[in-house]
């Protein structure tokens, strides 16, 4: 006698996964305001007439909503750090802009030249100096946070002090310096730091484009950029919400021909 048992797999076939319908988003909130998607009543962006790019033989123009700080040889919006109440030194397009901190380090006289709008480049392309002593200057946002200006064309120096660096802090993504005697262009997007109870609450952020190339990509600055020794920089120091833009006198001839700013909503 044989007992034959048969077990059949009677499991149900796999059920098809439930297809979720995409969420329909009809309203969005931006800056504390609620808007229907594609709402024609939502305010449009303001109209800004773009400027023209600069080249060696021609000075560019600023966007229509920009605050022009330097155009040609008009230095009425600037003052010398050494003698702020005195007349701004201007002699056939030449002027001095000494930096208080660097003046103690570099007591010799130097100049930063402002070139008239009609200026066509005629300067000597002779290379003088090396490392930090070649075309050294700096753009100081809020008179505290330095973006390095330096002739780094075939000129080796320390990486966090090369052209486009956040001095002593962040190395640029690339060295895009043009040859000596050619104009360089900087576009700087800066979000200032904020402070609470004597400490930094939100750190500064920088995006920098040099000669049309991104070299600092929304970098969060971890501290100050002031030089206090061969291998040391400062930390954040609480300060006001409004401080001046400054150009550094490092003892090397540097030419500037137009500077403008656009205030962005933070």
Image (cartoon, rainbow, N blue to C red):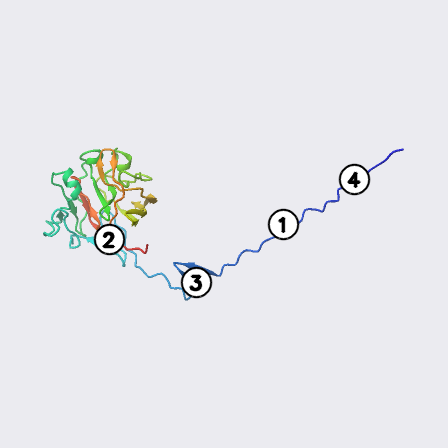
Q: Is mark 1 on a helix, strand or loop?
A: loop
78 left or right, relative to 54: left
The answer to whether the residue labelled 3 contacts the one labelled 1, judged by CB atoms less than 8 Å apart, is: no
Q: Is mark 3 on a helix, strand or loop?
A: strand
Relative height, residue 105 to residue 209 (above, below): above
Expressed as whole percent of the image width and height from the top left, the position of residue 123 reads 17, 42
The answer to whether the residue labelled 3 contacts the one labelled 4, judged by CB atoms less than 8 Å apart, is: no
Provide the residue designation for mark 4. 7
- Tag count in the figure? 4
Residue that appears at 34% across and 44% down: 219
Structural crowding at the residue carrying mark 3, measured as other residues with C-alpha within 10 Å and reported as few (<14), some (14–19) or many (≥20): some
Residue 77, visible in the rendered structure: yes
Name the N-terminal-most of marks 2 and 3. Answer: 3
Provide the residue designation for mark 3. 35
Structural crowding at the residue carrying mark 2, measured as other residues with C-alpha within 10 Å and reported as few (<14), some (14–19) or many (≥20): few
Give how far apart the Cα atoms at labels 1 and 2 are: 58 Å
Query: Where on the picture, by quarter, is residue 165?
Result: top left
In depth, the one of 189 and 14 nearer the eye is 14
Provide the residue designation for mark 1. 17
Give how far apart the Cα atoms at labels 3 and 1 are: 35 Å
Expressed as whole percent of the image width and height from the top left, the position of residue 198 reads 27, 47
Query: Where on the picture, by quarter, is residue 132?
Result: top left
Expressed as whole percent of the image width and height from the top left, the position of residue 188 reads 29, 48
Name the N-terminal-most of marks 3 and 4. Answer: 4
């Amino acid at each position: 006698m044989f007992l034959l048992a048969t077990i059949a797999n009677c499991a149900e076939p796999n059920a098809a996964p439930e297809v979720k319908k995409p969420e329909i988003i009809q309203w969005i909130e931006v800056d504390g305001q609620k808007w229907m998607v594609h709402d024609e009543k939502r305010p449009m962006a303001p109209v800004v007439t773009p400027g023209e790019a600069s080249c060696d033989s021609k000075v560019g123009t600023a966007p229509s909503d920009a605050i022009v700080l330097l155009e040609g040889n008009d230095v009425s919006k600037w003052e010398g750090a050494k003698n702020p109440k005195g007349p701004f030194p201007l002699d056939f397009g030449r002027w001095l802009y000494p930096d208080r901190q660097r003046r103690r380090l570099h007591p010799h006289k130097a100049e930063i030249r402002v070139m008239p709008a009609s200026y066509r480049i005629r300067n000597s392309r002779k290379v003088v100096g090396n490392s930090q002593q070649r075309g050294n200057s700096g753009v100081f946002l809020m008179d505290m946070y330095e973006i390095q200006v330096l002739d780094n064309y075939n000129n080796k120096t320390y990486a966090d002090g090369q052209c486009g660096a956040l001095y002593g802090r962040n190395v640029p993504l690339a060295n895009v310096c043009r040859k000596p005697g050619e104009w360089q262009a900087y576009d700087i997007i800066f979000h200032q730091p904020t402070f609470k109870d004597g400490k930094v609450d939100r750190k500064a952020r920088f995006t920098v484009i040099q000669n049309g190339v991104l070299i600092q990509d929304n970098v969060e600055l971890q501290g100050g950029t002031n030089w206090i020794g061969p291998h040391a920089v400062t930390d954040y120091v609480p300060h006001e919400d409004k401080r001046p833009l400054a150009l550094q006198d490092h003892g090397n001839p540097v030419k500037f021909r137009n500077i403008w700013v656009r205030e962005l909503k933070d």
